Amino acid sequence: CCTRSTGERLLGMRVNNVYDVDNKTYLIRLQKPESKAVLLLESGIRIHTTEFEWPKNMMPSGFSMKCRKHLKSRRLIYIKQLGVDRIVDFQFGSDQAAYHLIIELYDRGNIVLTDCEYTILNLLRFRTNEVQDVKLAVRERYPVDNAKGPEPLLTLERLSEFLANIPQGEQIKKILNPHLAYGATLIEHCLMMFGFSSSAKIGQDFDLSKDGEKLLAALQMAEEFMEKSKSFNGQCGRKLKDLGKSHAITRRTQSGLNPGVWNCKGYIIRKRESKPSLDPTKPPEELLTYEEFHPFRFAQHANSSCIEFESFDKAVDEFYSKIESQKIDIKALQQEKQALKKLDNVRKDLEKRLESLQVNQEYDKLKGELIEINLTVVDKAIEVIRSALANQIDWTEIGSIVKEAQEQDDPVACSIKDLKLNTNHITMLLKNPYVTDEEDQDVEVDQEAENEQTKSKKKKNKNKQQKKLLQKNKPILVDVDLSLSAYANAKKYYDQKRHAAKKEQKTVEAAEKAFKSAEKKTKKTLKDVQTVITIQKARKVYWFEKFLWFISSENYLVIAGRDQQQNELIVKRYLKPGDIYVHADLHGATSCVIKNQKGKFINLQHYKRTPPCRN
């Protein structure tokens, strides 16, 4: 499609100059009387004319200089595709004075400059193909004859043999794509036109014995699309052949394809992205980015957002000219999401810290209350362990004594769950003895829960566990200091609760400052990423801009020559009946012409100073 759409405009034009945008992208400026165009070539990617002003390198590359030497002022004779390969051949000049510029649009790509016999004069990338015994280098011949030719349409027998060896569950379009020249998008469209799903799989959505003829008809439709693209000229239509499938015609109508005419315009498919906002009341903005482009609007894109262009060439130009700025938009969107995510993480972290402090306060308060409720048991436990330590009994033996007492169901020993004598503490399991029997059954603690409490866990799990214990009023493990009395231990936990309350207040104040600072930083980040660099569309240059010119206060165009050659050109070509010629009585003064297309009277007092002031 690109060779046909660009060829219609460019054939017969002469090369004015060659520029390089980067080491893979080149601009060829073409012109003929009253018509100009710029052809953009990117190795391995694209070929199209462009209406945008692309940045050029200040110093032209060696390849650009070689192209200027051989192609400048030569006429573009033809543009053709080599076989069905993604290789395009541009011929400049004719007969023995012809030169070829060959662009490879596959793999890493290449641009090759050859003479009339396809002997390579220069190229972007040297390479050797050992399989085909081909070497691409200067003075070697470009293998034009190796181009792959079109293959005949598959028959039902060949198709059956081919699909019979394919394992179950494989997608049909992925199987057919490497073996056909149509491309995955066109294959998917034709499959959908004949009732298959876009992801039809062998053995699931496809049965060869029943759907073989439908698949063959779909491939025939793909072949018609390929034939259509060969006569593509930007806007055209051709009657569809009767495929013998009435439901296929119906589906074409539903998908937006006219059953009588095929549209051959240009379409850009767009993808929707949600742009986040700092204001929760404000809905997120929608960002539309270009995703792909096609010469037809295929069935799989029927519900997608798209832009229609009058030619495929313009669609390609628009896509690649805006895709760079859209990449910056997408990058800015990712930065915005990342900045907002950081702000959200700060908010969540502050909430977790406050929640942890509140839970710890309640937990310390509950520990103090349980010590006071079980005052006698706690005091006896402290007294027993102190007495054993005072008698210099070994710590291991103390543990054995406690276990023996627990086996005898001693209430004080049963409440002791762990001895932390290295820190002068014991761990006691305390509960409220005033709960009813039914409540007591609901809050029994199994052995697994006790083991989990003794293990060191993350703060997050610990806080959740503490909150659960508070809600269900379960027995709690309390560390008791042996150097303090029961009341003193209870007071210690109350003091910790008050200290945590003060810490919470300070944390709230600091959190507000930290969150405001993070929000301010996020807003600054969002503001910084708004800057977008775009490729500006080239403005049309008018004929008079090559001269000295201005528009007078009376709305007349005034032109003057920059040198002697332009002075003669103005008088011979642009001085028409009714125009006024103004010249200063000075040697070498510029010729000045006031364009008077309407033939009205002109007051010359405003224009008498123009020729002298330009000198």
Image (cartoon, rainbow, N blue to C red):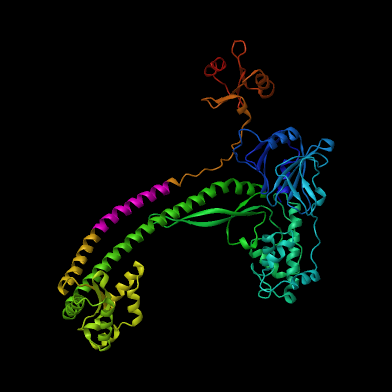
What predominant SS class does the magenta segment belong to?
A: helix
- Residue 141 percent coordinates (x, y): 81, 44
Residue drawn at x 67%, y 52% is 265
* Residue range (magenta): 506-527
- Residue 502 percent coordinates (x, y): 21, 60
Q: Is residue 512 left or right of residue 92?
A: left
Determine if the magenta segment contains residue 518. Answer: yes
Name the one closer to the observer, 403 or 576.
403
Q: In the displayed image of the protein, which residue is found farthest to the right?
A: 95
Residue drawn at x 24%, y 75% is 426
- Residue 590 percent coordinates (x, y): 61, 17
Q: Is residue 484 above or below residue 350?
A: below
Q: Is residue 15 above or below residue 419?
A: above
Q: Is residue 568 above or below residue 146?
A: above
Name the one closer to the observer, 570 or 415.
415
Determine if the magenta segment contains residue 531. Answer: no
